[in-house]
Amino acid sequence: MITILSWGGIGDTLRNIGLVPHQFLFQKFGIRCRVVRRPQQPGERECPPVPLFQELVERSPSLLWSGAMDNPPRHQRIGNRAVREIVKLLHHNAPQYFPFDFRLTEQERAMLPTRAPGFVVGVQTHLSGVPSKEWGIANWQSYLRMLLDKESPGISIVLIDNDDRVGELCFDPRISTTRGLNIAQSIAVAERVNLMISIDSWSKYVAASRRIPQLIVVPSQSEYHNPGGLAREWFEGIFNQPLNTLIGFEGTLQHPRATLDRIEDLSPKTLAQQTLNLIQIHRHSA
């Protein structure tokens, strides 16, 4: 059996699940991939509670929740690695992300914000969490106004954030939010946008799994050991890929470099202009 490790935050778990073609293995061979949760280690930042991950995994028919485990058996970890290496060989030697298939109930689906016609921009504002990723309400307000002023009435915006303050950004009827939704519902909303904008969070794996163009702001963060480790781990299969634009992380996979020391150095005008450029590029395929 193939074992997928869940650890850290939501993004870490989505990354590990998305790199394995679990739906294909289940549909073709009847194989369900086990998901085990590694207990939080001393010194690691606080993570969401284990039941959140269990509830999420149990929504997928091709995954099997197997509880907490410090060290899964070696043969199971080898099977996971073998599958991922085969995928890389079939995908021009680059990792590939696969859809998650987290099922919603009819009631949960009815609660999702109505998808507006036309081009939908998803924005994961990251109003709380890692301090080095917090851009502030004022910056987000300026950025959103610039988008709507330039593109009115051609786009709508959905803010992917459950923080209570996200309501302060809903100053226009073309802006909706995922406030009050659970993580599975938020993922479902993220899967149906035409362009994703994020401050380096879990939405980048959702966008990658659905081949959604995205712009990711990557401020320097103490939890990233070095640019090389960042490229190989958290941005594996995302860095230097055609549909992805990054701010603050440049170079090549062999020689990456971080260029945004503080998120405060990013201006709303810069992010808005980059977003508008991507809207123009990708609008025809919406």
Image: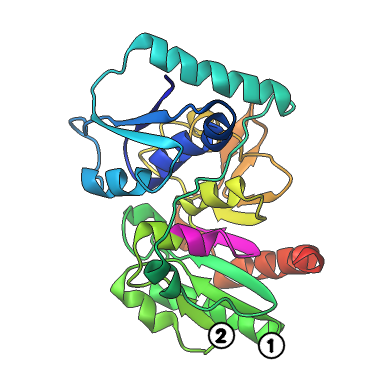
Q: Is residue 184 above or below residue 53?
A: below
Look at mark 2 in the image and give the residue it sits on: 174
* Label ID, residue 153: 1
Identify which residue is drawn at 57% across, 83% down: 145
Q: Is residue 6 above or below residue 125?
A: above
Callout 1 crowding tier (Cα within 10 Å): few <14, some 14–19, many ≥20: few
Q: In terms of image quadrants, where is residue 60?
A: top left
Membership of 192 in magenta stretch: yes
Q: Secondary structure at mark 2?
A: loop
Identify which residue is drawn at 41% across, 36% down: 63
Question: What stretch of residues is rendered in magenta?
Answer: 187-198
Q: Is residue 160 above or below residue 176?
A: above
**Quick check: marks 2 and 1 in contact, CB under 8 Å?**
yes
In the rendered structure, which disc, 2 or 1, sits on the residue that comes first in sequence? 1
**Place of residue 37 in the rendered image (x, y in percent of width and height, measured from the top left):** 28, 32
The amino acid at mark 1 is Pro
**Place of residue 211 in the rendered image (x, y in percent of width and height, measured from the top left):** 66, 50
**Place of residue 151 in the rendered image (x, y in percent of width and height, measured from the top left):** 70, 82
Distance between the Cα atoms at labels 2 and 1?
9 Å
For the view shown, which residue lies furthest in the right direction?
Answer: 284
Q: Secondary structure at mark 1?
A: loop
How many numbered callouts?
Answer: 2
* Label ID, residue 22: none
Instruction: Answer left or right for 162 relative to 118.
Output: left
**Colour style of the rendered protein structure:** rainbow
**Place of residue 66 in the rendered image (x, y in percent of width and height, measured from the top left):** 28, 30
Residue 46 in sight in this render: no
The amino acid at mark 2 is Arg
